[in-house]
Amino acid sequence: MATAKPASALLRMPTWHIVSNSGWNILGRVGPIGVALLVTPRLITHLGLARWGVMTIALTLVGTFGIFDFGLGRALTRAVAERVTEGRHQESADLTMTGILTLSVLGIIGGLVAALGVVAWVQHGLKIPDSLRPETTWAMWVLCATAPLVMANAAMWGVISAYQAFRAANLINIPISIGYYVAPLLILLVWNSLVGVMITLALCRVAMTIAYAWLCLRVMPQLRTARPAISLLRPLFRIGGWMTVSNLMFPILSYMDRFMIASVISSAATSYYTTPFDVVARLSLITNAVTGTAFPAMASLWRHDSAGTIQLYRTSVLTVAALLFPFCLVSALFGREILAMWVGGDFPQHSTMIMKFLSIGVFFFGVDGVAAGFLDGIGRPDFNAVLSVIEFAVYAPLLLLLLHLFGVDGAAIAWAGRSLLDCVIRIRLGIRFYPPLADAVRHILPMSAVALVTLGAAIFQDGIVITGVSFVLSSILFYAILWTRGLSAAERASALSLLKRAGMSRSRPA
């Protein structure tokens, strides 16, 4: 039986290992994207714009289930990593079993609450044809039934993260994630209904739950003898209390734009927003891959090793930025061409400017993900929560105003502005609570400024020649600044040494 890396190794885990685990997380998310790109136009054709818009909104409902976990999911990840690091394996197993059962029950409650609101929302909140309302209602109910699985999977992912078992987990995720795109298309060939689509998605989620349970038993054999103990959850509820607020606000802030577009304009107009959004937002998988690996390490390091914590923070931001920038730049410069080749129709006309603004937002949303994870890791989720509440109070009226002024483009402008402001505020909060962080930020700031200028300039550029030249020049400038200002002298020397050895290895005769 293959064994995962012990969580105690987090305390001495080199930066390259964080990058390696992030690579597996990225692969697990990037792998299915090629299938998604091929399948999405066919799904739009089979479903039509109205039903496709409803489907994209329905899928966002899954993200709202996290508001019912009372912060236990992320707190459980942190607690499991700490206990296993200290060698308290059986207590960790008892805590894990308690967390899985508790989150499953909360998922049932959350699913029921969501299901109760489906009818009112479909009847009065969506502008869709009357003939589509019954089908939409049943599809939403099927999706609500998967809430316990979503919650249980989140708890089991905490165990997988603590043991750094990302390779095995992503070998599971890839085929199941592909099923999320292929299965709906196959069912539409024999049953042209949103209900059938949601049933296939539910079955994929069942498969993931079974696979995660098997993997958890492999990395934590103590689960076989674990006994639930509610008393173990008390410290998690104290930590998770503030995280609950963040969990409540995050899906609201993330998805209110498409719900508001559907209510203010139309569900069909939502398609012009969600289609480019889904393309660009998939780049956040890079952020999730890096932060998912770094978060347990940050939580373990920050008390005992400030130098290691700062290096991990800086490496995480630089990794996210270096991987995100070329994709964001391509989306911003060549959005019209991408949309024309991918979905065609009138999407390029309606969605190009949306894609440009969203590209800016996704870049800074990525950097903000590291900053937010750091605040949680050092035990200050309260400020993440307070910031989310203040943000909602500002973002909601601003989004409504920009929708009326600029139509669907206004939603993209509002989202990009929110991502940038979030990033700035959270980084400043990190420095306030952990002053050594200022050294890392000095390395990050020049690179971030170049990214903002170059991505912002892409909004006003058009034409293959101009955008092509701009891509080359912007890329050279960004990576030159990252190399000279982002990396330390020791890191540059190490990178050059690795490149030199690799070149010498290739030049040797076989």
Image: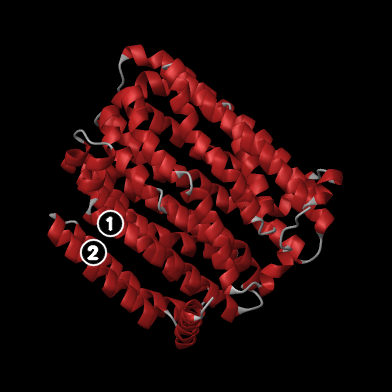
x and y percentages locating residue 41 in the rendered image? 33, 33
Give me the residue at 56% from left, 57% from top: 24
Give me the residue at 49% from left, 40% from top: 63
Which of the pair 48/428 is nearer the observer?
48
x and y percentages locating residue 155 in the rendered image? 66, 46
x and y percentages locating residue 401 in the rendered image? 22, 43
Residue 302 picture quarter: bottom right
Which of the pair 182/395 is nearer the observer?
182
Q: Is residue 360 visible?
A: no
Left or right side of 46 for 30: right
- Give the color scheme: rainbow, by chain, secondary structure or one colour: secondary structure
Check contact, mark 2 vs mark 1: CB within 8 A.
yes
Q: CA distance from mark 2 to mark 1?
A: 7 Å
Kind of element beneath mark 1: helix
Left or right side of 95 for 298: left
Residue named by callout 2: 471
How many dots with numbers?
A: 2
Residue reaching furthest to the right: 225
Q: Residues within 10 Å of mark 2 (few under 14, many from 20)?
A: many
Q: Is residue 397 visible?
A: yes
Q: Amino acid at mark 1?
A: Val
In the image, residue 409 above or below residue 307: above
Q: Residues within 10 Å of mark 1 (few under 14, many from 20)?
A: some
In the image, residue 499 above or below residue 169: below
